[in-house]
Amino acid sequence: MSVYETYKKSFWGPTIAWKRLFTKPVTIKIPKVYREAAERYRGFHINDLELCSGCSTCSKICPTDAIKMVPVDTEVEVGKKAQRPAIDYGRCSFCAMCVDICTTGSLKMTREYIHVSDDPNTFFFIPDETGIHQQEIHQGYQRDEDSELLDLERVEMTEIPAEERINSFIEYVKGYSKEQAISEAARCVDCELCVDACPANMDIPRYIESVFNNDTAKGVDWIYKTNPLPGVCGRVCTHKCETVCSIGHRGEAVAIRWLKRYIMDQESEEDIIRHARENIVKKGTGKIAIVGAGPSGLAAAYYLSLMGYDVTIFEAKNLPGGVMRYGIPRYRLPDEALDKDINVIKALGVKIKCNTSVGKDITLNELKEKHDAVFIGTGFTLGRSSEIQGSDHKDVLLALPLLEKIRNYLRNPEESRKPPVPDSLLVIGGGNVAMDVARSIVRLQRLEGKEANVKITSLESMEELPADLEEIVEGREEGIQFFPSRGPKEVVIENGKVKGLKTVACTRVFDEKGQFNPIFDESNVMLIDGEMIVEAIGQAPDYAYLPDELKNKLEFIKGRLIVNEKGQTSIEWLFAGGDIVSGPDIIHGVADGHKAAVGIDEFLNREEE
Ligand SMILES: Cc1cc2nc3c(=O)[nH]c(=O)nc-3n(C[C@H](O)[C@H](O)[C@H](O)COP(=O)(O)OP(=O)(O)OC[C@H]3O[C@@H](n4cnc5c(N)ncnc54)[C@H](O)[C@@H]3O)c2cc1C
Ligand code: SF4
Ligand code: SF4
Ligand code: SF4
C-alpha cells in the first residue's frame, strides 16, 4: 500500500480526531509544579539597552531569522544606532548564537521558559534588562571562551623596534601582508557603526570586504568615493572610526586605518589614476581657484575636477601637501606616499602653482576676477608662543618652523639649511605636535652619534595628555622623558645660553565645566634642563591675505570661519574648509573639501531668481 493510500481521505476522516479526545495531552498549558531551570538554560533573552549599540550583528547571525532590528526613541550618538533587537519567539530556536556573537555583551539569556498568552504579539518583543515578564531575572546561558564567535585580537602590525628605528627616519610601520590583511578584514562584522564616526563618512565595511575578497582594485573605488588622500590617511589618520568599532567593545577594534593603507599599497599609481578617470561624472564649465594645497584644498580640487571644472591650486610653499609635507615627520608619512596621492589628483588635470603666496604674489580679488568661485584652505600656519620671560631667546623655537626645516633637510640635505641638533632638548606641550618634535630630534641626535636626550613637559598629567596613546608609548620606547603637570614659568638663561625651563606645579588644567582654566602651585618649583626649548602649544591661522573689505563681511568664531553646510562663507563665491573652518585633522579637511566641491557645483549651477 502506498503512503498516499494510507492517508487518502475517507468519509470518516473528519471524525478520526475525536478518538484523541480522552488521551493525555503531550503539551501542557502551565506545569503544575514549576521547576527552576538549569543554570545554563537557554530561556528568553534579556538585553542591556544602554550597553547595546544597535549594531545588528545578532540579527545578521540568527539562523532562524528571529531577530528584527526595530527603531527606538533614543538619543543618537556616534557609535550607536537608534535601533535595538526584537525577538520573535515563534521563530527562535534558542541556539544562543546571538548571545555568543553580541559585540557588546549586552544580550544574554535567562532561565525563564514559560510564557502563556493568547496574544501572539507578546511573543515578539524588544528584550530589556527585565526580560519578557518584567520580574526578577535568573540569568541563564552566557557565552564562554569556547563559544566566542568574534575574533577579538587584532592582527599585529610589524614595526621596526625602537632601538633600531631611532637611528633613521625610515617609516617604522611596515604594513600588512596579504595574509595578515585578509585575517584582519575577517574580523569585521559589517555593522557600519564606524561610517558615522568617520568625518568623511567613508564606506569602511565595503572596502574592508574588498580586502577579504582579495579585490583591492574594488577597494580603491570605494575609498575614492569619499577620500582622495587614502595613502596618507592609511598611515596617519587620527582613526576616530576605530574608537567606535563594535569589536572594540570586548576586544581590539578592527585596524581600519591599516587596512586602508594595505589597499593603497597594493595598487599602482597608474591603476589608481585609471580608476579615478573612470569616475569623471560630468562636464562642468567653470574655473575654480583654490588657495592652499593642504588636505582640504586637494580634496576640493579632486572632486571639482571629477565634475569637470578647471581647477588651479595656489600654494605658497615650493611643494604641495600643507602640513602633510611640512609638519608630519617622515618616519610616519614618507614623501612617496603623499606624492602618490597627489599625483592622482594632478592626473585629473588639477594645476598646482607652487611658490605663489596669495596676498603677496596675487591678491584674492584678482583670483575672484579670473575664476567663478574660490576655495580657501590655508590652515593654521602660525605657531603660538607662551611668551614667558626668555622665550625670545634664539634657542627657543616654535614647533612648526622646526619640523619644516627637518623635513626640508631630509628631503634635500645639499640645498637646505641643517636643523639645529642640541645635546639636550625640552619640548613644551602635550599633544601630537610635541611628540613629533621630540621623536624627530631623538632621531637627529642619534644620526649625529649623540645620546638621545629629549624631555617633554606639559600642563596635563600623563592620563590627560592630548597626544595619542600610541605616540606616548612609542615615544617612551624611544627614550623620551616626560615631566607632566608642570606649567612653564621662565626660560633660564646663563651666560647667554639656555640652561632650562623653570616650571611650577600645575594642579588642575580644566575646570568643572571642562574649560581650559589651569591652576598652579607657585611654591612647587622645578628646573627642567635643556639647552634648546621648543614650544609646541598650538597653531593659529594667518588671514593676512584677506583684504579688509572681505574680512569685514566674513564671520568668525574663535578664529575659525563660519560656513554653511556646503562650505560656503557669507561671501557667496568664497568657500572654505580645513583647519580654518573645523580641524583638527586631515580627514576633517578632506570632508570639508568634498563638501565644498559639491557646494561650489551647486552654486555655479543655481537657477538665477
Ligand atoms: C606637526 C603636525 C602633525 C600633525 N599630525 C597629524 C596626523 O598625524 N594626522 C592628522 O590627521 N592630522 C595631523 N595634523 C593636523 C593636520 O595636519 C591638519 O589638520 C590638516 O593638515 C589641515 O588641513 P588644511 O586643509 O587646513 O591645510 P594645511 O595642511 O594646514 O595646509 C594649508 C596650506 O595652505 C598654504 N597657504 C597658507 N596661506 C596661503 C596663502 N596665503 N597663499 C597660498 N597658500 C597658502 C600653506 O602653505 C599650506 O600648504 C598635524 C598637524 C601638525 C601641525
Ligand atoms: S537564540 Fe538563536 S534562533 Fe533565537 S534569536 Fe538568538 S540566534 Fe536567533
Ligand atoms: S549584537 Fe549585541 S550590541 Fe549588537 S544589536 Fe545585538 S544585542 Fe545589541
Ligand atoms: S570596522 Fe568595526 S565598526 Fe566598522 S563595520 Fe567593521 S566591525 Fe563594524
Image (cartoon, helix red, strand yellow):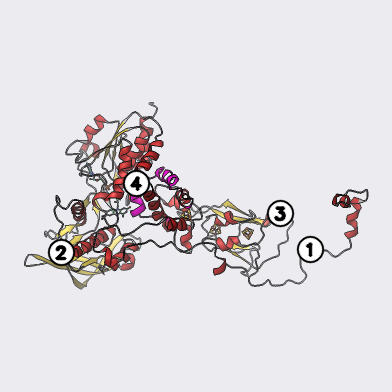
- Say which label, 2 or 3, has the lower sequence index: 3
Q: Give the range drawn in magenta.
A: 212-241
Residue 422 badge: 2
Whole-Å distance between the Cαs marked 3 and 4?
54 Å
Locate residue 217 relative to residue 389 in the image: left or right: right
Number of labels in the image equals 4
Residue at disc 3, secondary structure = helix
Label 1, ligand 2: CB separation under 8 Å = no
Whole-Å distance between the Cαs marked 2 and 4?
35 Å
Image location of residue 441, percent across then percent down: 21, 62
Whole-Å distance between the Cαs marked 2 and 3?
78 Å
Amino acid, disc 3: Pro
Image quarter (top left, top right, bottom left or bottom right) of the C terminus: top left
Amino acid, disc 1: Thr
Circle 3 sits on which residue? 120
Q: Between tags 1 and 3, which lies in front?
A: 1
Question: Residue 462 versus residue 91: which sits nearer the camera?
Answer: 91
Whole-Å distance between the Cαs marked 1 and 4?
65 Å
- Say which label, 1 or 2, has the lower sequence index: 1
Report crowding for label 1: few under 14, some 14 to 19, many 20 or more residues within 10 A (C-alpha): few
In the depicted structure, whether residue 206 falls above or below residue 507: above
Report crowding for label 3: few under 14, some 14 to 19, many 20 or more residues within 10 A (C-alpha): few
Question: Residue 552 versus residue 235: which sits nearer the camera?
Answer: 235
Amino acid, disc 4: Leu
Residue 229 badge: 4
Question: Residue 222 versus residue 3: which sits nearer the camera?
Answer: 3
Label 2, ligand 1: CB separation under 8 Å = no
Q: Between tags 3 and 4, which lies in front?
A: 4
Residue at disc 2, secondary structure = loop
Dot 2 and dot 4 residues touching (CB under 8 Å):
no
Residue at disc 4, secondary structure = loop
- Say which label, 1 or 4, has the lower sequence index: 1
